[in-house]
Image (cartoon, helix red, strand yellow):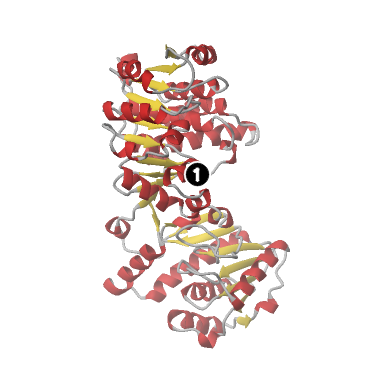
Amino acid sequence: MNRVLTAEETRALDRKTIDELGVPGILLMEHAARAVAERALRMVGEAGRFFVVAGAGNNGGDGYAAARLLLAEGREATVLAVVPSADLCGDAALQARLFSAFGGRVGDLTDLAAGPGDVVIDAIFGTGLSRPPRGVFAEAIAAVRAARARGARVLAVDVPSGVSSDTGQVLETAVHADATVTFGAWKRGLLCHPGAELAGEVEVAPIGWPPGALEVLRPAVHLLDDDGVRGLLPRRPADAHKGTFGHCLVIAGSPGKTGAAALTGLGTLVAGAGLCTVASRPEALEQVQAHAMELMGMPLPGQGPLGLADAAILHGALEGKAALLAGPGLWRGEETAALLEALLGAYDGPAVLDADALNALAAKPDALRAAKGPVVVTPHPGEMARLCGVSTAEVQADRIEVARFFAQTYGCTVVLKGAHTVIADPEGAAAISPVAHPGLATGGTGDVLAGLLAGLCARGLEPGAAARAAVLVHGRAAETVAARTGAAGLIASDLLHGIREVWARWGR
Protein backbone atom coordinates (compact mmCIF):
# COMPACT_ATOMS: atom_id res chain seq x y z
CA MET A 1 0.00 0.00 0.00
CA ASN A 2 1.34 3.46 -0.93
CA ARG A 3 1.30 5.38 2.33
CA VAL A 4 1.11 9.18 2.35
CA LEU A 5 2.93 10.86 5.24
CA THR A 6 2.80 14.03 7.28
CA ALA A 7 6.02 15.80 8.22
CA GLU A 8 5.78 14.39 11.75
CA GLU A 9 5.30 10.84 10.46
CA THR A 10 8.37 11.30 8.26
CA ARG A 11 10.42 12.45 11.26
CA ALA A 12 9.16 9.48 13.29
CA LEU A 13 10.39 7.04 10.66
CA ASP A 14 13.77 8.75 10.51
CA ARG A 15 14.04 8.59 14.32
CA LYS A 16 13.09 4.92 14.37
CA THR A 17 15.69 4.11 11.73
CA ILE A 18 18.49 6.12 13.34
CA ASP A 19 17.80 5.86 17.08
CA GLU A 20 16.27 2.40 17.42
CA LEU A 21 18.05 0.51 14.66
CA GLY A 22 21.32 2.38 14.78
CA VAL A 23 21.45 3.25 11.08
CA PRO A 24 23.69 6.33 10.75
CA GLY A 25 21.81 9.41 9.55
CA ILE A 26 24.59 10.08 7.06
CA LEU A 27 23.74 6.78 5.36
CA LEU A 28 20.11 7.86 4.87
CA MET A 29 21.42 11.13 3.45
CA GLU A 30 23.65 9.25 1.00
CA HIS A 31 20.68 7.20 -0.24
CA ALA A 32 18.64 10.38 -0.68
CA ALA A 33 21.47 12.17 -2.48
CA ARG A 34 22.01 9.26 -4.84
CA ALA A 35 18.35 9.38 -5.88
CA VAL A 36 18.53 13.14 -6.41
CA ALA A 37 21.73 12.93 -8.45
CA GLU A 38 20.38 10.17 -10.67
CA ARG A 39 17.17 12.12 -11.35
CA ALA A 40 19.14 15.29 -12.04
CA LEU A 41 21.30 13.48 -14.60
CA ARG A 42 18.16 12.44 -16.47
CA MET A 43 17.02 16.06 -16.64
CA VAL A 44 20.18 17.86 -17.75
CA GLY A 45 21.03 18.91 -21.28
CA GLU A 46 24.07 17.54 -23.11
CA ALA A 47 26.38 20.33 -21.93
CA GLY A 48 24.26 21.38 -18.99
CA ARG A 49 25.52 22.37 -15.57
CA PHE A 50 24.17 21.71 -12.09
CA PHE A 51 23.47 24.42 -9.54
CA VAL A 52 22.50 23.21 -6.06
CA VAL A 53 20.81 25.84 -3.89
CA ALA A 54 21.46 24.48 -0.39
CA GLY A 55 19.76 25.51 2.84
CA ALA A 56 20.83 25.07 6.42
CA GLY A 57 19.32 21.73 7.49
CA ASN A 58 19.36 18.13 6.33
CA ASN A 59 17.76 19.17 3.05
CA GLY A 60 20.84 21.29 2.42
CA GLY A 61 23.00 18.32 3.38
CA ASP A 62 21.18 16.23 0.76
CA GLY A 63 22.03 18.96 -1.74
CA TYR A 64 25.76 19.03 -0.89
CA ALA A 65 25.88 15.22 -1.13
CA ALA A 66 24.09 15.20 -4.48
CA ALA A 67 26.50 17.81 -5.80
CA ARG A 68 29.47 15.66 -4.73
CA LEU A 69 27.99 12.62 -6.50
CA LEU A 70 27.52 14.70 -9.65
CA LEU A 71 31.15 15.78 -9.46
CA ALA A 72 32.10 12.11 -9.21
CA GLU A 73 30.25 11.57 -12.50
CA GLY A 74 32.52 14.15 -14.12
CA ARG A 75 29.81 16.84 -14.29
CA GLU A 76 30.05 20.51 -13.38
CA ALA A 77 28.19 21.04 -10.09
CA THR A 78 28.22 24.19 -7.98
CA VAL A 79 26.66 24.61 -4.56
CA LEU A 80 25.09 27.99 -3.91
CA ALA A 81 24.95 28.30 -0.13
CA VAL A 82 21.94 30.10 1.29
CA VAL A 83 23.77 30.19 4.63
CA PRO A 84 27.56 29.92 5.08
CA SER A 85 28.76 26.33 5.21
CA ALA A 86 30.55 27.19 8.46
CA ASP A 87 27.13 27.62 10.09
CA LEU A 88 26.02 24.08 9.25
CA CYS A 89 26.01 21.32 11.85
CA GLY A 90 25.72 17.56 12.06
CA ASP A 91 25.43 15.50 8.88
CA ALA A 92 24.89 18.60 6.73
CA ALA A 93 28.22 20.05 7.89
CA LEU A 94 29.97 16.76 7.11
CA GLN A 95 28.49 16.70 3.60
CA ALA A 96 29.64 20.27 3.00
CA ARG A 97 33.22 19.33 4.03
CA LEU A 98 33.13 16.24 1.77
CA PHE A 99 31.94 18.35 -1.16
CA SER A 100 34.84 20.76 -0.69
CA ALA A 101 37.28 17.85 -0.31
CA PHE A 102 36.15 16.60 -3.72
CA GLY A 103 37.11 19.98 -5.18
CA GLY A 104 33.59 21.35 -5.29
CA ARG A 105 33.04 25.08 -5.48
CA VAL A 106 30.69 26.85 -3.06
CA GLY A 107 29.25 30.14 -4.25
CA ASP A 108 26.24 32.27 -3.40
CA LEU A 109 22.99 33.23 -5.06
CA THR A 110 24.67 35.81 -7.28
CA ASP A 111 26.34 32.89 -9.09
CA LEU A 112 23.03 31.34 -10.15
CA ALA A 113 23.42 31.87 -13.91
CA ALA A 114 21.47 28.77 -14.95
CA GLY A 115 19.67 28.73 -18.27
CA PRO A 116 18.46 26.25 -20.91
CA GLY A 117 20.07 22.84 -20.52
CA ASP A 118 21.02 23.45 -16.88
CA VAL A 119 19.43 21.91 -13.79
CA VAL A 120 18.86 23.78 -10.55
CA ILE A 121 18.46 21.53 -7.50
CA ASP A 122 16.23 23.06 -4.82
CA ALA A 123 17.64 21.89 -1.48
CA ILE A 124 16.57 24.94 0.54
CA PHE A 125 13.85 23.50 2.78
CA GLY A 126 12.57 19.99 3.44
CA THR A 127 9.38 18.68 5.02
CA GLY A 128 9.81 20.62 8.26
CA LEU A 129 8.94 24.09 6.96
CA SER A 130 5.94 25.51 8.86
CA ARG A 131 6.22 29.27 8.39
CA PRO A 132 6.74 31.61 5.44
CA PRO A 133 10.34 31.90 4.20
CA ARG A 134 11.94 35.21 5.04
CA GLY A 135 15.11 37.11 4.22
CA VAL A 136 17.79 35.20 2.34
CA PHE A 137 15.58 32.09 2.14
CA ALA A 138 12.86 34.00 0.28
CA GLU A 139 15.58 35.44 -1.96
CA ALA A 140 16.83 31.92 -2.69
CA ILE A 141 13.35 30.79 -3.73
CA ALA A 142 13.03 33.86 -5.95
CA ALA A 143 16.38 33.07 -7.55
CA VAL A 144 15.34 29.49 -8.33
CA ARG A 145 12.07 30.72 -9.86
CA ALA A 146 14.00 33.23 -11.99
CA ALA A 147 16.35 30.50 -13.23
CA ARG A 148 13.36 28.39 -14.29
CA ALA A 149 11.94 31.41 -16.12
CA ARG A 150 15.24 31.62 -18.04
CA GLY A 151 14.83 28.01 -19.20
CA ALA A 152 16.62 25.95 -16.55
CA ARG A 153 14.91 22.84 -15.24
CA VAL A 154 14.28 22.65 -11.50
CA LEU A 155 14.49 19.53 -9.34
CA ALA A 156 13.10 19.77 -5.79
CA VAL A 157 14.53 17.71 -2.94
CA ASP A 158 11.70 16.02 -0.96
CA VAL A 159 9.18 18.90 -1.45
CA PRO A 160 9.44 22.20 -3.33
CA SER A 161 10.73 24.80 -0.90
CA GLY A 162 7.95 27.02 0.38
CA VAL A 163 5.25 24.35 0.03
CA SER A 164 3.69 22.93 3.19
CA SER A 165 4.51 19.24 3.29
CA ASP A 166 1.23 18.53 5.10
CA THR A 167 -1.30 20.61 3.16
CA GLY A 168 0.23 21.58 -0.19
CA GLN A 169 -0.38 25.26 0.56
CA VAL A 170 2.21 27.85 -0.44
CA LEU A 171 3.70 29.62 2.56
CA GLU A 172 3.72 32.99 0.74
CA THR A 173 6.32 31.99 -1.88
CA ALA A 174 7.49 28.66 -3.24
CA VAL A 175 9.72 27.00 -5.81
CA HIS A 176 8.01 25.74 -8.97
CA ALA A 177 9.75 22.47 -9.81
CA ASP A 178 9.72 20.40 -12.98
CA ALA A 179 10.29 17.28 -10.89
CA THR A 180 10.55 16.31 -7.23
CA VAL A 181 12.38 13.39 -5.62
CA THR A 182 10.65 12.64 -2.33
CA PHE A 183 12.08 10.20 0.16
CA GLY A 184 10.62 6.98 1.50
CA ALA A 185 6.94 7.70 0.79
CA TRP A 186 4.57 10.28 -0.64
CA LYS A 187 3.99 13.45 1.36
CA ARG A 188 0.49 14.89 1.66
CA GLY A 189 1.48 18.25 0.21
CA LEU A 190 2.59 16.61 -3.05
CA LEU A 191 -0.99 15.44 -3.63
CA CYS A 192 -2.85 18.60 -2.60
CA HIS A 193 -2.94 21.68 -4.80
CA PRO A 194 -1.17 23.98 -5.36
CA GLY A 195 1.70 21.85 -4.05
CA ALA A 196 0.85 19.02 -6.43
CA GLU A 197 1.25 21.32 -9.41
CA LEU A 198 4.42 22.98 -8.10
CA ALA A 199 6.06 19.58 -7.52
CA GLY A 200 5.98 18.57 -11.18
CA GLU A 201 6.67 14.89 -11.81
CA VAL A 202 7.13 13.13 -8.46
CA GLU A 203 9.49 10.20 -7.89
CA VAL A 204 9.41 8.33 -4.57
CA ALA A 205 12.91 7.08 -3.69
CA PRO A 206 13.73 4.58 -0.91
CA ILE A 207 16.34 5.86 1.57
CA GLY A 208 16.81 2.91 3.91
CA TRP A 209 13.82 2.86 6.24
CA PRO A 210 13.44 -0.68 7.63
CA PRO A 211 11.06 -3.06 5.84
CA GLY A 212 7.57 -2.90 7.29
CA ALA A 213 8.18 0.36 9.16
CA LEU A 214 5.42 2.16 7.28
CA GLU A 215 2.91 -0.53 8.15
CA VAL A 216 3.93 -0.45 11.82
CA LEU A 217 3.49 3.32 11.88
CA ARG A 218 0.13 2.92 10.10
CA PRO A 219 -0.22 6.42 8.60
CA ALA A 220 -3.83 7.50 8.24
CA VAL A 221 -3.63 8.22 4.51
CA HIS A 222 -2.72 6.13 1.47
CA LEU A 223 -2.60 6.62 -2.29
CA LEU A 224 -5.00 4.58 -4.40
CA ASP A 225 -3.47 2.20 -6.93
CA ASP A 226 -4.96 0.09 -9.70
CA ASP A 227 -3.98 -3.30 -8.31
CA GLY A 228 -5.39 -2.55 -4.88
CA VAL A 229 -8.69 -1.26 -6.24
CA ARG A 230 -9.02 -4.07 -8.76
CA GLY A 231 -8.74 -6.51 -5.86
CA LEU A 232 -11.83 -4.96 -4.24
CA LEU A 233 -14.13 -5.87 -7.11
CA PRO A 234 -16.30 -8.99 -6.86
CA ARG A 235 -16.32 -11.49 -9.71
CA ARG A 236 -19.39 -11.80 -11.92
CA PRO A 237 -20.45 -15.46 -11.96
CA ALA A 238 -21.40 -16.96 -15.31
CA ASP A 239 -24.85 -18.03 -14.07
CA ALA A 240 -25.76 -14.55 -12.80
CA HIS A 241 -28.92 -12.64 -13.74
CA LYS A 242 -29.92 -9.00 -13.39
CA GLY A 243 -31.13 -9.55 -9.84
CA THR A 244 -27.71 -10.81 -8.81
CA PHE A 245 -26.06 -7.41 -9.02
CA GLY A 246 -28.54 -5.25 -7.15
CA HIS A 247 -31.19 -2.70 -7.91
CA CYS A 248 -30.49 1.03 -7.34
CA LEU A 249 -33.10 3.65 -6.59
CA VAL A 250 -32.02 7.09 -7.82
CA ILE A 251 -33.96 10.13 -6.62
CA ALA A 252 -32.91 12.84 -9.04
CA GLY A 253 -33.87 15.17 -11.85
CA SER A 254 -36.05 18.21 -12.32
CA PRO A 255 -37.07 20.37 -15.31
CA GLY A 256 -33.89 21.60 -16.93
CA LYS A 257 -31.75 19.09 -15.03
CA THR A 258 -32.91 15.79 -16.45
CA GLY A 259 -29.49 15.04 -17.92
CA ALA A 260 -28.03 14.85 -14.43
CA ALA A 261 -30.47 12.13 -13.46
CA ALA A 262 -29.87 10.20 -16.68
CA LEU A 263 -26.09 10.33 -16.32
CA THR A 264 -26.39 9.19 -12.72
CA GLY A 265 -28.66 6.30 -13.57
CA LEU A 266 -26.43 5.16 -16.41
CA GLY A 267 -23.47 5.45 -14.06
CA THR A 268 -25.05 2.82 -11.79
CA LEU A 269 -25.45 0.48 -14.75
CA VAL A 270 -21.92 0.85 -16.13
CA ALA A 271 -20.76 0.13 -12.57
CA GLY A 272 -22.32 -3.28 -13.05
CA ALA A 273 -25.58 -2.88 -11.12
CA GLY A 274 -28.33 -5.10 -12.46
CA LEU A 275 -31.19 -2.57 -12.42
CA CYS A 276 -31.74 1.14 -11.88
CA THR A 277 -35.00 2.98 -11.21
CA VAL A 278 -35.10 6.76 -11.31
CA ALA A 279 -37.75 8.48 -9.19
CA SER A 280 -38.72 12.01 -10.22
CA ARG A 281 -41.69 14.24 -11.04
CA PRO A 282 -43.55 13.03 -14.17
CA GLU A 283 -42.57 15.98 -16.34
CA ALA A 284 -38.89 15.38 -15.60
CA LEU A 285 -39.02 11.60 -15.62
CA GLU A 286 -40.27 11.44 -19.20
CA GLN A 287 -37.17 13.28 -20.38
CA VAL A 288 -34.85 11.25 -18.14
CA GLN A 289 -36.06 8.03 -19.71
CA ALA A 290 -35.83 9.54 -23.16
CA HIS A 291 -32.11 10.06 -22.50
CA ALA A 292 -31.58 6.39 -21.64
CA MET A 293 -33.82 3.46 -22.52
CA GLU A 294 -32.05 1.21 -19.98
CA LEU A 295 -33.45 3.16 -17.01
CA MET A 296 -36.72 2.34 -15.32
CA GLY A 297 -38.83 5.14 -13.93
CA MET A 298 -41.03 5.85 -10.92
CA PRO A 299 -43.15 8.99 -11.26
CA LEU A 300 -43.57 10.95 -8.04
CA PRO A 301 -47.11 12.43 -8.11
CA GLY A 302 -47.47 16.12 -7.50
CA GLN A 303 -45.72 19.23 -8.63
CA GLY A 304 -42.70 21.22 -7.65
CA PRO A 305 -39.96 20.45 -5.14
CA LEU A 306 -39.81 17.14 -3.30
CA GLY A 307 -40.91 17.03 0.33
CA LEU A 308 -42.47 14.94 3.06
CA ALA A 309 -45.55 14.25 0.92
CA ASP A 310 -43.29 12.03 -1.22
CA ALA A 311 -42.03 9.99 1.72
CA ALA A 312 -44.62 7.20 1.62
CA ILE A 313 -44.13 6.32 -2.05
CA LEU A 314 -40.35 6.48 -1.72
CA HIS A 315 -40.37 4.29 1.39
CA GLY A 316 -42.26 1.73 -0.65
CA ALA A 317 -39.86 2.10 -3.57
CA LEU A 318 -36.89 1.36 -1.31
CA GLU A 319 -38.14 -2.12 -0.47
CA GLY A 320 -35.76 -4.63 -2.03
CA LYS A 321 -33.34 -1.98 -3.27
CA ALA A 322 -29.63 -2.63 -2.79
CA ALA A 323 -28.62 1.04 -2.79
CA LEU A 324 -30.13 4.53 -2.66
CA LEU A 325 -28.75 7.58 -4.45
CA ALA A 326 -30.25 11.06 -4.06
CA GLY A 327 -29.32 14.49 -5.27
CA PRO A 328 -28.27 15.05 -8.91
CA GLY A 329 -30.57 17.65 -10.39
CA LEU A 330 -32.95 17.20 -7.44
CA TRP A 331 -35.93 19.52 -7.23
CA ARG A 332 -35.25 20.99 -3.81
CA GLY A 333 -37.66 22.87 -1.55
CA GLU A 334 -38.27 23.72 2.10
CA GLU A 335 -39.20 20.15 3.03
CA THR A 336 -36.55 18.32 1.00
CA ALA A 337 -34.18 18.02 3.96
CA ALA A 338 -36.96 16.56 6.09
CA LEU A 339 -37.74 14.02 3.34
CA LEU A 340 -34.11 12.95 3.08
CA GLU A 341 -33.85 12.71 6.86
CA ALA A 342 -36.92 10.44 6.94
CA LEU A 343 -35.56 8.19 4.19
CA LEU A 344 -32.13 7.90 5.82
CA GLY A 345 -33.73 7.11 9.17
CA ALA A 346 -35.72 4.21 7.72
CA TYR A 347 -33.47 2.67 5.03
CA ASP A 348 -30.79 0.30 6.28
CA GLY A 349 -28.93 -0.09 2.97
CA PRO A 350 -26.11 2.10 1.64
CA ALA A 351 -27.11 5.63 0.66
CA VAL A 352 -25.11 7.96 -1.59
CA LEU A 353 -25.88 11.68 -1.28
CA ASP A 354 -24.72 14.08 -3.96
CA ALA A 355 -25.30 17.61 -5.22
CA ASP A 356 -28.64 19.11 -4.09
CA ALA A 357 -29.19 16.39 -1.50
CA LEU A 358 -26.09 17.74 0.23
CA ASN A 359 -27.23 21.32 -0.15
CA ALA A 360 -30.60 20.38 1.35
CA LEU A 361 -28.92 18.78 4.37
CA ALA A 362 -26.33 21.52 4.90
CA ALA A 363 -28.43 23.03 7.70
CA LYS A 364 -28.97 19.67 9.43
CA PRO A 365 -25.94 17.41 8.92
CA ASP A 366 -26.86 15.48 12.07
CA ALA A 367 -29.24 13.54 9.82
CA LEU A 368 -26.15 11.77 8.49
CA ARG A 369 -25.15 10.57 11.95
CA ALA A 370 -28.72 9.39 12.63
CA ALA A 371 -29.00 7.37 9.41
CA LYS A 372 -29.99 3.73 9.81
CA GLY A 373 -27.60 2.51 7.10
CA PRO A 374 -24.14 3.58 5.92
CA VAL A 375 -23.98 6.93 4.12
CA VAL A 376 -21.53 8.23 1.52
CA VAL A 377 -21.46 11.96 0.73
CA THR A 378 -19.80 13.22 -2.45
CA PRO A 379 -19.34 17.00 -2.14
CA HIS A 380 -17.28 19.31 -4.27
CA PRO A 381 -15.36 21.92 -2.22
CA GLY A 382 -18.23 24.44 -2.24
CA GLU A 383 -20.71 21.84 -0.99
CA MET A 384 -18.22 20.65 1.61
CA ALA A 385 -17.88 24.25 2.80
CA ARG A 386 -21.67 24.53 3.23
CA LEU A 387 -21.82 21.23 5.12
CA CYS A 388 -19.01 22.34 7.46
CA GLY A 389 -20.15 25.96 7.82
CA VAL A 390 -16.80 27.33 6.62
CA SER A 391 -15.47 28.99 3.47
CA THR A 392 -14.40 27.10 0.37
CA ALA A 393 -10.89 28.49 0.88
CA GLU A 394 -10.78 26.89 4.34
CA VAL A 395 -11.78 23.53 2.86
CA GLN A 396 -9.11 23.77 0.17
CA ALA A 397 -6.46 24.84 2.69
CA ASP A 398 -6.39 21.32 4.18
CA ARG A 399 -8.61 19.01 2.15
CA ILE A 400 -7.46 15.81 3.82
CA GLU A 401 -8.10 16.90 7.38
CA VAL A 402 -11.43 18.56 6.53
CA ALA A 403 -12.66 15.34 4.94
CA ARG A 404 -11.38 13.20 7.83
CA PHE A 405 -12.93 15.47 10.44
CA PHE A 406 -16.35 15.47 8.78
CA ALA A 407 -16.32 11.70 8.24
CA GLN A 408 -15.46 11.02 11.86
CA THR A 409 -17.85 13.63 13.23
CA TYR A 410 -20.91 12.47 11.28
CA GLY A 411 -20.10 8.78 10.90
CA CYS A 412 -20.15 8.74 7.10
CA THR A 413 -17.79 8.17 4.20
CA VAL A 414 -16.71 11.42 2.52
CA VAL A 415 -15.67 11.72 -1.12
CA LEU A 416 -14.28 15.26 -1.36
CA LYS A 417 -14.07 15.82 -5.09
CA GLY A 418 -11.43 17.83 -6.92
CA ALA A 419 -7.92 17.35 -8.22
CA HIS A 420 -6.68 14.31 -6.27
CA THR A 421 -10.07 13.47 -4.75
CA VAL A 422 -9.95 12.55 -1.05
CA ILE A 423 -11.93 9.61 0.39
CA ALA A 424 -12.27 9.57 4.19
CA ASP A 425 -14.02 6.94 6.28
CA PRO A 426 -15.70 7.19 9.71
CA GLU A 427 -12.73 5.54 11.45
CA GLY A 428 -10.34 8.28 10.33
CA ALA A 429 -8.50 6.54 7.51
CA ALA A 430 -8.29 8.29 4.16
CA ALA A 431 -7.23 7.62 0.59
CA ILE A 432 -6.20 9.98 -2.18
CA SER A 433 -6.68 9.51 -5.89
CA PRO A 434 -3.50 9.67 -7.98
CA VAL A 435 -5.57 11.32 -10.74
CA ALA A 436 -5.90 15.08 -11.17
CA HIS A 437 -7.39 15.36 -14.65
CA PRO A 438 -8.58 18.70 -16.07
CA GLY A 439 -10.99 16.88 -18.38
CA LEU A 440 -13.21 16.21 -15.35
CA ALA A 441 -13.82 19.94 -14.91
CA THR A 442 -17.06 19.89 -16.86
CA GLY A 443 -20.72 19.55 -15.95
CA GLY A 444 -22.10 16.08 -15.31
CA THR A 445 -18.89 14.23 -14.48
CA GLY A 446 -19.81 14.26 -10.79
CA ASP A 447 -23.21 12.75 -11.63
CA VAL A 448 -21.47 9.84 -13.36
CA LEU A 449 -19.21 9.38 -10.32
CA ALA A 450 -22.17 9.30 -7.93
CA GLY A 451 -23.91 6.70 -10.09
CA LEU A 452 -20.76 4.62 -10.39
CA LEU A 453 -20.36 4.65 -6.61
CA ALA A 454 -23.99 3.68 -5.94
CA GLY A 455 -23.80 0.94 -8.55
CA LEU A 456 -20.76 -0.56 -6.86
CA CYS A 457 -22.60 -0.44 -3.52
CA ALA A 458 -25.51 -2.26 -5.16
CA ARG A 459 -23.10 -4.96 -6.33
CA GLY A 460 -22.21 -5.59 -2.71
CA LEU A 461 -19.07 -3.55 -2.07
CA GLU A 462 -18.76 -2.05 1.38
CA PRO A 463 -19.36 1.73 0.99
CA GLY A 464 -15.75 2.75 1.71
CA ALA A 465 -14.44 0.23 -0.80
CA ALA A 466 -17.06 1.32 -3.32
CA ALA A 467 -15.98 4.94 -2.87
CA ARG A 468 -12.32 4.16 -3.41
CA ALA A 469 -13.04 2.02 -6.46
CA ALA A 470 -15.43 4.53 -8.00
CA VAL A 471 -13.03 7.44 -7.61
CA LEU A 472 -10.10 5.64 -9.21
CA VAL A 473 -12.10 4.07 -12.05
CA HIS A 474 -13.73 7.45 -12.77
CA GLY A 475 -10.29 9.09 -12.97
CA ARG A 476 -8.82 6.34 -15.14
CA ALA A 477 -11.83 6.61 -17.45
CA ALA A 478 -11.11 10.32 -17.90
CA GLU A 479 -7.48 9.57 -18.76
CA THR A 480 -8.56 6.87 -21.21
CA VAL A 481 -11.02 9.10 -23.05
CA ALA A 482 -8.80 12.19 -23.03
CA ALA A 483 -5.98 10.20 -24.62
CA ARG A 484 -8.20 10.07 -27.72
CA THR A 485 -10.20 13.30 -27.54
CA GLY A 486 -8.05 15.68 -25.51
CA ALA A 487 -9.04 17.04 -22.11
CA ALA A 488 -10.90 20.06 -23.47
CA GLY A 489 -13.21 17.91 -25.57
CA LEU A 490 -14.20 15.45 -22.86
CA ILE A 491 -17.86 15.50 -21.83
CA ALA A 492 -19.57 13.61 -19.06
CA SER A 493 -21.26 10.99 -21.23
CA ASP A 494 -17.82 10.06 -22.62
CA LEU A 495 -16.99 8.69 -19.17
CA LEU A 496 -19.64 6.00 -19.53
CA HIS A 497 -17.63 4.57 -22.42
CA GLY A 498 -14.35 5.18 -20.62
CA ILE A 499 -15.47 3.24 -17.55
CA ARG A 500 -16.29 0.24 -19.70
CA GLU A 501 -12.83 0.48 -21.27
CA VAL A 502 -11.25 0.47 -17.81
CA TRP A 503 -13.24 -2.64 -16.86
CA ALA A 504 -12.09 -4.34 -20.05
CA ARG A 505 -8.44 -3.39 -19.50
CA TRP A 506 -8.50 -4.53 -15.90
CA GLY A 507 -10.24 -7.73 -16.90
CA ARG A 508 -7.37 -8.57 -19.23
Q: Residue at x 54, y 29 (%)?
A: 444
Count of number-bearing discs: 1
Using the rendered image of the protein, determine whether residue 220 is visible from the camera's viewpoint: yes
- Work out whether residue 112 or residue 333 is closer to the camera in this orientation and state it: 333
Residue 150: image location, x then y, percent: 73, 64
Q: Which residue is mark 1?
A: 381
Using the rendered image of the protein, determine whether residue 208 is visible from the camera's viewpoint: no
- Lateral position of residue 163 relative to residue 339, left or right: right
Quadrant of image for the C terminus: top left
50, above or below 104, in the image: above
- Work out whether residue 67 or residue 204 is closer to the camera in this orientation and state it: 204
Q: Residue at x 64, y 31 (%)?
A: 485
Query: Could you say which quadrant of the image residue 115 lies in?
Result: bottom right
- Work out whether residue 61 or residue 442 is closer to the camera in this orientation and state it: 442
- Looking at the rendered structure, the secondary structure element under dot 1 is helix
Residue 209: image location, x then y, percent: 35, 64
Q: Residue at x 52, y 55 (%)?
A: 202
48, above or below 497, in the image: below
394, above or below 450, in the image: below
Which amino acid type is marked by label 1? Pro
- Lateral position of residue 53 relative to residue 215, left or right: right
133, above or below 211, in the image: below
Residue 212: image location, x then y, percent: 29, 57
Residue 48: image location, x then y, percent: 68, 66
Classify mark 1: residues with Cα within 10 Å, few (<14), some (14-19) or many (20+). Answer: some
